[in-house]
Amino acid sequence: MAAILEVKNLKKDFKGFTLNNISFSLERGYIMGFIGPNGAGKSTTIKLIMNLLKKDNGEIKIFGLDNIKHEKEVKNKIGFVFDENYFYEELTVMEMKRVIAPFYKNWDDVTFNKYIKDFSLPANKKIKDLSKGMKMKFSIAVALSHEAELLIMDEPTSGLDPIIRSELLDILTSLIQNENKSVFFSTHITSDLDKIADYITFINKGSIVFSCPKDDILENHGLVKGPREILNDEVRKYFIGIKENHFGFEGLTKDRQQIKKMLRDNVIIEKPSLDDIMLYYTKEAKM
Amino acid sequence: MLYLILKDILIQKKIFIFGIFYILILILSFQGIGNIMFSSSIIAFAYILVQSACAYDDKSKSDIMLNSLPISRNTIVTARYVSTFIFAAIAVAYYVILTNIIKILGLPLKVYPITLEEIVAALFAITLLSGIYFPVFFKFGYIKSRVVNIVLFFGLFFGLGILLPQMIKNMDKEFAESIIRSFINQPDILIAVEILAVMIGLLVISYILSLKFYKEREF
């Protein structure tokens, strides 16, 4: 089956920042985490997908359709959650729903009301009086009430407390039980993704560093600790980045097996977290 | 599109209530000035509503939200133009109701009936204002277009109230008279058609520009 989201050689030039021919694709039934430091190009990519920015070059296909030629059709099946509140603060939850609902072909009031109840959202409170967590939950309720097949989330967890974050992750996990649906989820809080993501796409300075299954990434990469003496040029080649101090070194390798073969018992190899991986890759880029 | 206009009305609930007093105040302050009472009230009220709808959209950064929904940019632009005339219609309704209440209660206030000329003048002014304002708004957003807005709003009243009579006074008398004569000699209906044609022409150009600008906008 065709990918639910396919980005090919996407390019966008700004003053001082370039999104550099990025490509990745997401299959149906999976959650993809889109990670990278602040300013790496995550929001730019998402805005290009939503056609809020005009691309300079490349191709974006959603449900196999061009995102601009079939804009309306595509957006009917996308649920979006952004990091900030873009709803009308002056309206109540129900009024806002009344304005938004008619635009979606498959809006389902029953589902929406169920979420409102589940999230204990106050239906007649103005949006500006909701807490940040409540606003996010309202966005999610809207995003999930029109039979969306692709959920696009831009930093949905930033600024939320751990309890609400974990609730959100539960919602996403249960959503993905339906194999027809996918989630594309940008964040710089990678611990959220350790739990739920199937794929990780890592962007740094406008370029994709890698885009692969999370388990492969965590298995192939290794956090290596050992004495400094064993670091020679041959060994260094296999590292993404190395931190050295008086006592020894710690480094991230892309090829855990090779390091194991070369250095054997001289080093300890640990499983890195996504945070470690992001940290080493971005540091390397800085050097 | 209807729901976009509904949204404009919902977010401005307060202004609609406030509008009753606003028009009342205008009626009071235009005592003795004459027929201009009606058109001024309508123009001012409709324009305030348009402005505040744009301001609310800007404040909520709703361009991002609206453009993430399955709504085409055409619809967003069209809704703005249509809502202008809906706001004008609401203003007319307020005016009619208020002046009738004043008459029925026999309050010692002068009210002026609405004439065809007044309606045409009001519509023309609203078309002119929004026709010039909207392309700027769609190109630059609310904040940056505020300067244009102020210039337009005061320019209109200033222009109609002071400059135009001055210009007519200073114009070559014969030339002015010939223009006026040519208007007077035309049947009313022809004048109405001419004004209508100018209005439609202005709206079409303005609409095309707005569409072009808004389609190129990035958020």
Image: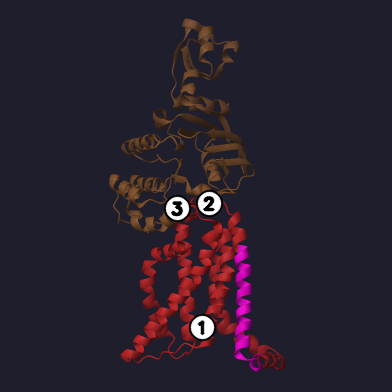
Chain colours: A brown, B red
Badge 2 or badge 3: first in the primary sequence: 2
Total labels drawn: 3
Point out the stretch of residues depicted in magenta.
B183-209
Give residue A202's position: percent from left, percent from top.
52, 31
Q: Helix, strand or loop at disc 2?
A: helix
Q: Nearer the viewer, residue B123 or A84?
A: B123
Residue B133, image quadrant: bottom right
Q: CA distance from mark 2 to mark 3?
A: 10 Å
Number of the label disc, if any, that sits on residue A104: 3
Between disc 1 and disc 3, the foreground one is: 3
Q: Is residue B201 magenta?
A: yes
Secondary structure that dominates the magenta span: helix
Q: Which residue is mark 1?
A: B119
Number of the label disc, if any, that sits on residue A79: none
Question: Residue A248: in sight, yes or no?
Answer: no
Indicate the amino acid at tag 1.
Ile
Q: Helix, strand or loop at disc 1?
A: helix
Q: Nearer the viewer, residue A110 or A134?
A: A110
The residue located at (53%, 19%) in the rendering is A254
Relative to B39, say whether A123 is above or below: above
Give residue A73's position: percent from left, percent from top.
52, 49
| Drawn side of residue A132 relative to residue A187, left or right | left
Q: Which residue is mark 2?
A: A72
Relative to A235, say whether A273 is above or below: below
